Image (cartoon, rainbow, N blue to C red):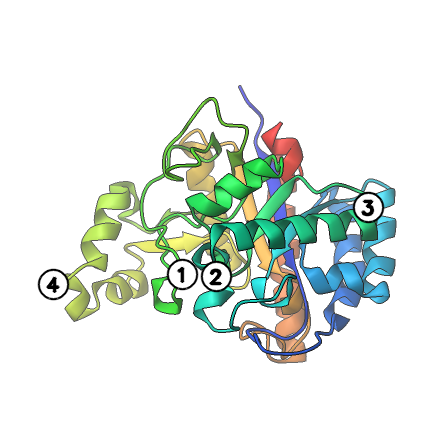
Amino acid sequence: MVAAKLLVTIDTEEDEWGAFGLARYSVSNIERLTRLQELFDRFGVRPTYLVTQPVTEAESAIEVLAPILERGGCEIGSHCHPWNTPPQVEDRTPRNSMLCNLPEDLQYQKLKHLKESIRAAYGVTPTSFRAGRWGFGASVARNLARLEFVVDSSITPYLTWEAIEGPDFDREYPSEQYRMSTDDIALEDKRSQLVEIPTTTGFTGALAGGGYPIHRAISRAPLTWIRARGIASRLGLFRTTWLCPEMTDVKEMIDLSNRVLSHGGTTLNLMFHSTTLTAGLTPFVRTGADEVAFLGRIRAYLEYCRVRGIGSATLSESAS
């Protein structure tokens, strides 16, 4: 029997949520990772911090993350925000904030630059990746393989980002971890060197056993005209649930995790943004009280994992 493992994958980024046109970006939120890492250490969790370009340039950020890395407390991976990763030759528009919408060669140049910046700042060559704003597709996958990345975690099953000019991931994928075809990211290719570990997304509620067919049925017309998804969620019948403490309460995260494990799953990929640790930087945490509640949700979920005997792994460890 394969032991279950918890992956904590954190988009570790600049303060300015959704600002594409700035000349400079600040990273004050990175200071909050010291307290967060203390929590992880108490639970024996080794997170993967997926860092953006500004987090490789600010000495204050390096001073926080480098000591954690040096003592083996985390993995440092790559998180590309195209709007602040050189070369910056494209227009800074919402569409171009999605890496997958850029020309393939420009994607490659940005990914290569960020990889080299991480190596220079932290002394390690990143092998894990997540696209900023989930802007991922086959062209990005090809570039990751070309740059010898080992693992991607950009897919959010059953969710679509089309409303913000991004990709549509609303489908079923081969498994919770698979070798990804660089021609079609929804297909498995056992010869591929690139492993996909999607974020953990699934179904909860009384009708969760109906799975993807129910999700699709209530997400499409004519049922969308009567807001079937909202009604099913409020009644506790069916929810599309994300293992993300920004979006999901502790009970729902535990319900989702129990469902994954009961169906033979072995990987729980918990994700959130470093900026959510600071009130006012994201829509998810607006006040000091929200900050306390957010950390409380993370702590409660880690306690659940400890009680269940679920160990910790980083992205690259899980992919190996």
- Type of residue at label 1? Gly
- 13 relative to 181, above or below: below
Mark 4 or 3 closer to N-term?
3
Q: Which residue position is annotated with label 3?
A: 69
- Type of residue at label 2? Met
Crowd tier of the residue under label 4, counting other residues whose Cα lies within 10 Å: few below 14, some 14–19, many 20 or above: few
Tell me where residue 216 appears, x and y as whole percent: 23, 51
* Residue for point 85% across, 66% down: 60
The CA distance from mark 4 to mark 3 is: 51 Å
- Mark nearest the camera among 4 and 3 is 3
Crowd tier of the residue under label 3, counting other residues whose Cα lies within 10 Å: few below 14, some 14–19, many 20 or above: some
> Is mark 1 in CB contact (under 8 Å) with mark 2?
yes
Which of the 4 image quarters holds residue 292?
A: bottom right
Q: Which residue position is annotated with label 1?
A: 166
Q: Left or right: 207 with respect to 2?
A: left
Q: Which residue position is annotated with label 2?
A: 98
Mark 3 or 2 closer to N-term?
3
Q: Left or right: 3 with respect to 54?
A: left
Tell me where residue 318 appears, x and y as whole percent: 61, 32
Badge 3 element: helix
* Residue nearest the observer in this picture, 240 or 12: 12
The CA distance from mark 3 to mark 1 is: 32 Å
Badge 2 element: loop
